Amino acid sequence: MRHALPFVVLFLLADGVASAQKPPLLPEKGVAALAQELSGETAKRNLEGIARFHRQRGSQGFHSAAELVAERARAYGLSDVAILQFPADGKIFYGTQRSRPAWDAEFAELWEMKDGGAAIKMASYEAEPVVLAEDSESADVTADLVDVGEGTKESDYAGKDVKGEIVLAGAQPGAVQDLAVGKFGAMGIVSYAQNQKTAWWGEDENLIRWGHLKTFSANKTFGLMVSLKTARALREQLSNGEKIQLRAIVKAGQHASNYEVVTATIPGADPKLKEEEIAFSCHLDHQRPGANDNASGCVTILEVARTLQKLISEGKLARPARTIRFIWPPEIEGTLALLNGKPEFAARIKAVVHMDMVGGGQVTKAVFHVTRGPLSLPSFVHDVAWAFAEFVNEQSYKFAATGSAEYPFVAPEGGKEPLQAQDSAYTMGSDHDVYQDSSFGIPAIYLNDWPDRYIHTNFDTAANIDPTKLKRAAFIGASSGYFLASMAPQSLPEVELLVRQGSDLYKASVFPRLNSLSAEDAVCIEDFHAQYEWGLKGRLAQFLHMPLKDGSANTANHAGCAADREQANGGDWRFRRKAEPRGPVAVFGSDYVNDRTAASGIATPRIFSYEGLWGGGEEYAYEVLNFADGVLDAQQIRDRVSAEYGPVPLDMVAEYLSTLERIGVVERVK
């Protein structure tokens, strides 16, 4: 949705559109070379290869996909191609991530047993691996099916004897297993969980959605996923008093192995700056086919790598000053293993272009986003990415509307509709959360599709991927990453202009919200955005190794409206994040805060369940920890996260910081 903008901003926009036919930031010769060389078809052919594999963490399928990516990277002439390995056994920690043992599956089938020995096959892992919930264990069980509704509350089991039986549940297997199996003695779970709900949820009842069991639950079991159509038929039979006997055969399980992370580089040219890196990131793991999520991001950065390497070697692009690195890890846990297991990577990476779902065609209903970073980490890199995205928007719309444009960014086998990328505020949910966590502080450009009607289902196939979309995402990513790797002080005026325009647009969307807030909170939001702009200047100067003019951005960023406000409910407490553990506290398989509070008998912090005007509990918690720098007090942190996501009670922020102190994540500063 577009917001009403002040006249001055509209004037700037109109002026920008008029001159935007000329590409931003890069010489037009370089832009033309990128536009011609980037191939959506090449990216999609690589995607079709990756989508053949069931790419679970540490599995044979993931290893096969990693080998395919590494082979392509070598064939494209990249340097330092390697598959790095990090032990994963369920005991080793990588920062806040407890490593999860690898999980492999060989076989799974679900049969309905009929009278007289006949049987009907209901699900097959060989045909559709998504039918087997991740972290399932081996079993060969013949038992009756019992409907337990959602299966997440004890009341769901009232009056039902599930001991030794298989339960039919509407919730994810992991949300059911400790009750159904652990407390009531069920042998296994059949689930029709409808996760990732969008406006199109429920329209296609044939979809089978990806299921997960708890990695570290003591109640090991199996979970098999069925479609909503199948589940409705089963529930109707059971409600009519019919007996349904199932046989579930599973050969699968966890085992100690390794996280594998593929990496490669294009070395920089400057003797000093080549030690700095601009990274391209994605996540290689997913269920098969997992085409948009996230084979699309993986093959798009592979296409960026091929194109940049080819154009540099041909002399059509100058070798950038900084090194460009490409990274293909398992989602979040692989990135945490890399940055914690090899801290030199974290030290060298100055910015990231992260791609997670960038190829959805029209049938997926996808909207493409260029997502900004959290307000705790001011950065100009998002304005760089948006400049290139806006250029693609303009050129692709012109082509769609008139049939002619200098840079249509259309693939021969792809669509011709305009891109219509959105400049979006920070949202969580992928590896960009790890990079932008305060323990690493690496700004990330996040390119992503949302919504996607087929995410985490058996219909997330290569057939729904648009080569034109891949080409356009590749151009935005390649241009942004190459510019950042080449960026020199002479680029400063143009980048500063983009930053000012981006700031004006952001404030134009945020400030209308002030009418719904108290006068005190409205003043704090205006004040914080002034401080944020100082932070932007500081980050820009730091990136270019230039002195900051007009004083210290850090000092300005820590002043603010909270200085004169009444300090109560712990508002004057100050906390500083400890050097270890590094990473977000909400990760895959285990939750660093909840695991430790549960073990210590500490109440779960209320902030996790708080719903603000523009954000939820996980987002508040992420940013509260990011702002805990030993300088800001709890009141000032409260005001900053309120500016970002809407007002939150101070006592919730103070409670969360105190909990983090008790479990050793932060320390109180006197």
Image (spheres, grey):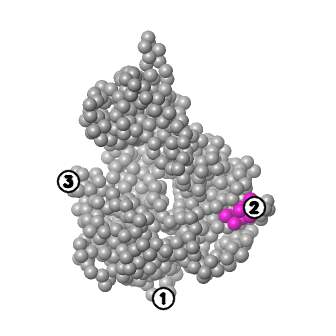
Q: Tell me the residue at 72%/59% (across/down).
A: 409
Residue of label 2: 401
The quarter holding residue 618 reads bottom left
Question: Which x, y percent locates residue 84?
Answer: 48, 50
Q: Which residues are magenta?
A: 392-401
At mark 3, the secondary structure is: loop
Answer whether labels 1 and 2 touch (C-beta < 8 Å): no
Q: Main secondary structure of the magenta part?
A: helix
Question: Which x, y percent locates residue 258?
Answer: 42, 44
- Between the C-alphas of marks 3 and 1, the distance is 50 Å
Answer whether labels 3 and 2 touch (C-beta < 8 Å): no
Residue 42 tag number: none
- Of the image marks 1 and 2, the number of the one nearer the N terminus: 2
- Between the C-alphas of marks 3 and 2, the distance is 62 Å
Viewer can see residue 560 = yes
Residue of label 1: 550
Q: Is residue 230 above or below residue 670?
A: above
Q: Is residue 501 left or right of residue 100?
A: right
Front position among marks 3 and 1:
3
Amino acid type for the residue under numbered disc 3 = Gly
The quarter holding residue 140 reads top left
Q: Quadrant of the N terminus?
A: bottom right
Front position among marks 3 and 2:
2
